[in-house]
Image (tube, rainbow, N blue to C red):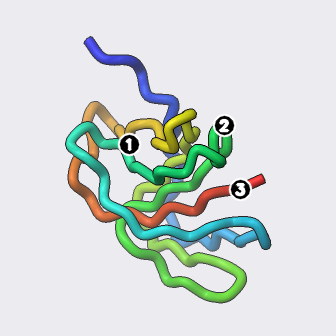
Amino acid sequence: MGRISKSHVWPTNSKIAIYKKEKDVLLYKETDGKGNVQTHKKDWHKCKATVIQGTPEDYLDRLEVCEDAIIWTCEINSRGRLSALTHDGKTYKNEDVTVLVHAK
């Protein structure tokens, strides 16, 4: 049996806005076969990231996310990989996601 993911799903039921900070980095990625996202940035070790299933509306200061999207808070490991995206027993493999890295 695999390790438990350090990703946490946000409890959302309506459209929300996520405000970006100056040092935040926005990436458009695809999860791998294990539900992980590879950033290949070792400098982001121990940083947090907000991951959104699909593509939200991107404005200068914020992201607007529709009510049916799933949002996770993830940790970035020493290899630049985010914790696995799971929800209700499902692993989100080969999914397009938007990653907002909260860089230090």
Which residue corresponds to mark 1?
Answer: 85
Q: Is residue 93 above or below residue 69?
A: above
Q: Earlier in the sequence, mark 2 or mark 1?
A: 2
Image point (76%, 66%), residue name? 23
Percent position of residue 52, x then y: 45, 61
Residues under numbered marks 3 and 1 in contact, where contact means CB atoms less than 8 Å apart: no
Mark drawn on residue 46: 2
Mark 3 is surrounded, within 10 Å at the Cα level, by few (under 14), some (14 to 19) or many (20 or more) other residues, namely: some
Q: Earlier in the sequence, mark 2 or mark 3?
A: 2
Residue type at mark 3 is: Ala
Q: Which quarter of the figure has residue 61?
A: bottom right
Q: Is residue 14 above or below residue 84?
A: below
Secondary structure beneath dot 3 equals loop
Question: Which-is-in-front pick, marks 3 and 1?
Answer: 3
Structural distance between the alpha carbons of marks 2 and 1: 17 Å
Q: Is residue 7 above or below residue 54?
A: above
Q: Is residue 20 above or below residue 70?
A: below
Residue type at mark 2 is: Lys
Apparent side of residue 93 relative to residue 28 in the rendered image (left or right): left
Secondary structure beneath dot 2 equals loop
Percent position of residue 27, x then y: 49, 68
Mark drawn on residue 103: 3
Question: Which-is-in-front pick, marks 2 and 1?
Answer: 2
Percent position of residue 1, x then y: 26, 11
Q: Earlier in the sequence, mark 3 or mark 1?
A: 1
Q: Which quarter of the figure has residue 103?
A: bottom right
Mark 2 is surrounded, within 10 Å at the Cα level, by few (under 14), some (14 to 19) or many (20 or more) other residues, namely: some
